[in-house]
């Protein structure tokens, strides 16, 4: 299938999260109900990396993790393509050391390097065709010795999704409370994540949390260079 078809899917995914921003926290409350225990474990795992130094959060959304990061960071730069989600994030985490950036992560380049790159519920929205380039971007965002912390869903999460067939990447169909439906990429990279990252030159560890979540930590086996060397190739 063509690049255009994938670009259209990724545009629809961005539109979905813009439209969903106001109801996101009510429909994905990782700090409530049966997920509260999972969140506690994820926060505890994240905190073993404190102090974080300069943090880059990719696809921060409404900021469900931004406050946790801000607590232990010297600065947080949080990037997302949804103006609506960023507005909620700003209300939630109104701190001078937290900067919010609106950008499409498949076209964005870092202006500096970071000690920790964090993303939750984002990797599974990266299509397989963009996986390698996405991780090249992550590498380009890191200081030598910098680390990555990833939170995402295990394949069991597919039981609560409606798969959409015939798409340019693994895709689900999501419905808003208004009834509008959108396509979103959904790729369960576990159980292969560690192996895939090893091939790309990362040292990675993956831990499962309950039935639905995992977290991964990763660092470059050989850091790419001593300092920021300019914009990377465009992420495609
Ligand atoms: C499942 S939400 C995760 C939000 C947050 N990290 C969390 O754990 O609650 C996915 C986020 O990715 C953002 N997003 C989708 N496509 C994007 C893109 N191409 N560039 C940047 N952000 C994007 C959406 O706006 C949304 O906030």
Image: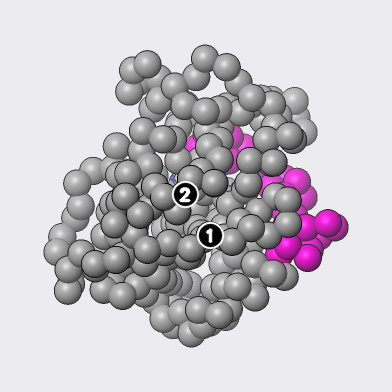
Q: Is mark 2 within 8 Å of ligand 1?
A: no
* Residue drawn at (63%, 46%) of the image: 154
**Outermost residue to the right:** 33
Location of mark 1 (residue): 206
Q: Is residue 99 left or right of residue 144?
A: right
Judging by the rendered image, the residue that carries numbered circle 2 is 193
Quarter of the image for residue 198 reads bottom left
The vertical placement of 121 against 76, above or below, is above
Dominant SS type (magenta): helix
Q: Residue furthest left?
A: 229
Closer to the camera in the image, 136 or 207: 207
On the question of residue 92 being in view, the answer is no
| Label 1 residue SS | strand
Residues under numbered marks 2 and 1 in contact, where contact means CB atoms less than 8 Å apart: yes
Mark nearer the N terminus (2 vs 1): 2
Q: Let me know if residue 15 is in the magenta part.
A: yes
């Amino acid at each position: 299938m063509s690049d255009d078809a994938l670009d259209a899917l990724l545009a629809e995914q961005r539109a979905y999260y813009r439209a969903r921003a106001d109801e996101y926290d009510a429909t994905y409350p990782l700090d409530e109900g049966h997920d509260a225990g999972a969140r506690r474990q994820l926060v505890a795992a994240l905190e073993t990396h404190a102090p974080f130094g300069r943090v880059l959060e990719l696809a921060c959304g409404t900021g469900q993790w931004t406050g946790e990061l801000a607590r232990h960071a010297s600065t947080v730069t949080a990037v997302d393509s949804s103006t609506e989600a960023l507005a909620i994030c700003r209300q939630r985490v109104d701190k001078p050391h937290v900067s919010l950036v609106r950008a499409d992560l498949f076209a964005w380049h870092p202006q500096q390097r970071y000690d920790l790159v964090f993303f939750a519920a984002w990797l599974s929205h990266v299509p397989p065709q963009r996986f390698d380039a996405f991780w090249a971007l992550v590498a380009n965002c890191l200081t030598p010795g910098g680390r990555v912390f990833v939170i995402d869903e295990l394949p069991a999460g597919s039981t609560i999704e409606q798969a959409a067939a015939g798409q340019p990447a693994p895709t689900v169909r999501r419905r808003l409370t208004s009834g509008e439906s959108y396509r979103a990429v959904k790729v369960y990279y576990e159980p292969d994540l560690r192996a895939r990252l090893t091939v790309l030159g990362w040292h990675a560890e993956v831990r499962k949390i309950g039935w639905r979540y995992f977290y991964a930590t990763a660092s470059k086996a050989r850091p790419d260079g001593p300092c920021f060397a300019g914009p990377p190739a465009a992420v495609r």
